Image (tube, rainbow, N blue to C red):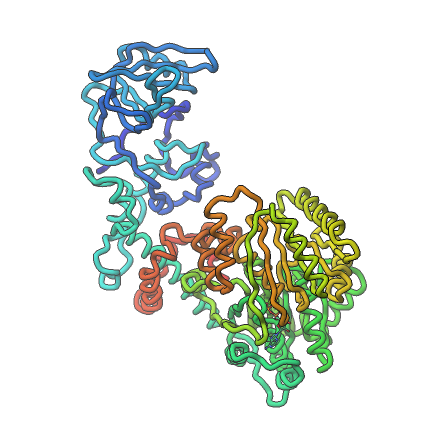
Amino acid sequence: MPDAPDTAASAKPPRRPRPPAAAPAGQPLSGPQRALRRLGLVRDIDLALHLPMRYVDETRLAPIATLRDGDTAQVQGHVTASRVETRNRRQLVVHLADASGELVMRLLHFYPSQQKTLAAGALVRARGELRHGFFGREMVHPEWRVVQPDTPLPRALTPVYPASAQLPQAYLRKAVVSALARAPLDELLPPALLPPGLPTLREALERLHHPAPGLDAEALHDPAHPAWQRLKFDELLAQQLSQARSRAERAALAAPALAVREGGLLARLRATLPFALTAAQQRVVAEIGADLARPRPMHRLLQGDVGSGKTVVAALAAATAIDAGWQCALMAPTEILAEQHFRKLVAWLEPLGVGVAWLTGSRKGRTRREMLERLASGDAMLAVGTHAVIEDDVRFARLGLAVVDEQHRFGVAQRLALRDKLGDASAECRGLEPHLLMMSATPIPRTLAMSYYADLDVSTIDELPPGRTPVLTKVFADGKREQVVARIRDEVARGRQVYWVCPLVEESEHVDLQNATATHAELSAALPGTGVGLLHGRMKAAEKAAVMARFTAGELAVLVATTVIEVGVDVPNASLMVVEHAERFGLAQLHQLRGRVGRGAVASVCVLLYTPPLSETGKARLRALAETGDGFEIARRDLAIRGPGEMMGARQSGDALLRFADLAADEVLLERARALAPQLWAEHPQAAARQVERWLGGREDYLRA
Ligand code: ADP
Ligand code: MG
């Protein structure tokens, strides 16, 4: 089909669609052109890959009398009367009749010219939903246009594109048609390498943009349709090719080889640890050690459930680097978490003669300058801190290893900045990159690891240290609050400690803070003689540290906190956690939170309080937490509920997310694309490069971890 169906006037005053060719440089863009740009539709190929979200059937006319309330249909009839009504609001009321019956078309927005066009006698084709309204059987602002008795009906379904208020469908349809004709869509992949039975990319796009006559919408919406399969495969392949390339590029870079010395710092640290490493910890320590010993930058993700003991693994990696004469930097997303690391690392490493520098935003002035000097001179071999570690004025003498905790909470740029810290060091370091170890308590489901994180090596701690008791999780409506407070009283009487977590959402920070303050007051009143502390993000770092110290020391039995305790707090005596407004948290976040209890030998409980009414999905989400304590299973369910965008932090990954492929449903295609990518780079490098360019354009960088 060479052309899209004719343009229809829509309810809003229509804009004249102009030819959608890209505006020459320097010329102002028209409204719709700007709207295209905002949707990322810049190149012809972008428009060609902008696919219909659904199809409407304009191939048939329904006799007006056959329409029932709620039917969406296309009708055609003569205008028998038309007038402007001003009752309630100004509107154009048009009576339409065909041989079978009559209806009223109501236009709430209209131009005077349209009023003329819709004069009695005009033949009108309209598509909309029939309702029983004020004027009887009516269609409120249907799509309509005036036709001639011999105006043909489209023979195929009409595509409906994702659009925006500034971008009329008609304009977008024309833009797609002409872009599709111009876009370079030659077949890049040798047919023998494609999954069997798939059309070419051009055929696939033509089929979806211009459905064949007679094809029904259901067939087109089926994700198993070969045309969709082709698009999904191509998209996955581009992603895999991009990842394979960045992996190869990294393999060509140099890093200091950090070999383990017998009887060196690593051995001495292991000997002084108060516990034996779990088998899983030993395995990942060996995996990391093997990477560090190679003269190529490590790029490894260490994943392990909350409480699985990642910090000590990081400490052992740091010891390896330091023993080889190279510095290590450890960066954590919050000051509290960074401080937890700092305390542990100082306790483990300073007795062995390692100088540790502490860098956070709140450390300014002379102490900060001192820290910077110690790092620049190599006097301090380990830096621990927040984002402050990557600030411009931080210089390392010889940075050999960078560790990022809770890596998904940092942006790509921040991780890159850490890697660049070596470049500006001494001549000996020029051309070298530090090794990079990323840690995460949010396990990445297999399909995500194979796609978005395909250029990472992954080590997994799949075992908790011995002696932990599983946390019992219960879900209650907020009405049970009094019983929960009674439970707190019991725990405190037994000498145990309790966390009470209130949500903190950035947009409503003020209200949330009031919420936390009110809860603090409520608990203080309900538990006389009990130390109840309050911790929130607006407090100064020193105040927060003081409250944390009192809780850690046991002076405070109850700690009311906003999500600042989300990660990293380690108080083995805490046995009960209450999460208020649990429905506002992500599943992974709740799982991390409850990992703060159950750290000692006592049986621990996590109470998730929700505020009714809660949707069925909302309840199902919370129930999932009560049902499983397995972080992997929770991550899998989270992925299913929220999609990969949110899991990865959509802000960083932006448009690079998959548009067509569905990681859960398309695992087979994903496997295939993954196997094909290295072969394509080896045998058809130009085709591989064009495939990446076609699909990812300038957005490739987003994909890199
Ligand atoms: P996470 O993986 O959540 O960061 P941490 O590193 O904070 O976990 O470890 C949780 C707690 O377990 C810490 O108190 C840590 O010292 C302790 N720990 C780590 N490894 C072991 C082990 N092998 N045996 C006993 N306790 C351990
Ligand atoms: Mg940790």
Estimate the x, y position of residue 237 in percent, counting from the top left. Answer: 35, 59
In the image as oriented, which residue stretches furthest toward the right? 366
Foreground residue among 161 and 349? 349
**Horizontal side of residue 521 vs 166, given as left or right:** right
Estimate the x, y position of residue 484 in percent, counting from the top left. Answer: 64, 53
Foreground residue among 169 and 182? 169
Estimate the x, y position of residue 142 in percent, counting from the top left. Answer: 35, 24
Query: Looking at the figure, which quarter contains the N terminus?
Result: top left
Foreground residue among 520 and 656? 520
Q: Does 608 appear above or below 305?
A: above
Q: Residue at x 49, y 49 (%)?
A: 619
Estimate the x, y position of residue 358 in percent, counting from the top left. Answer: 72, 67
Q: Residue at x 59, y 66 (%)?
A: 404
Foreground residue among 277 and 8? 277
In the image as oriented, which residue stretches furthest toward the bottom? 262
Q: Is residue 35 visible?
A: yes
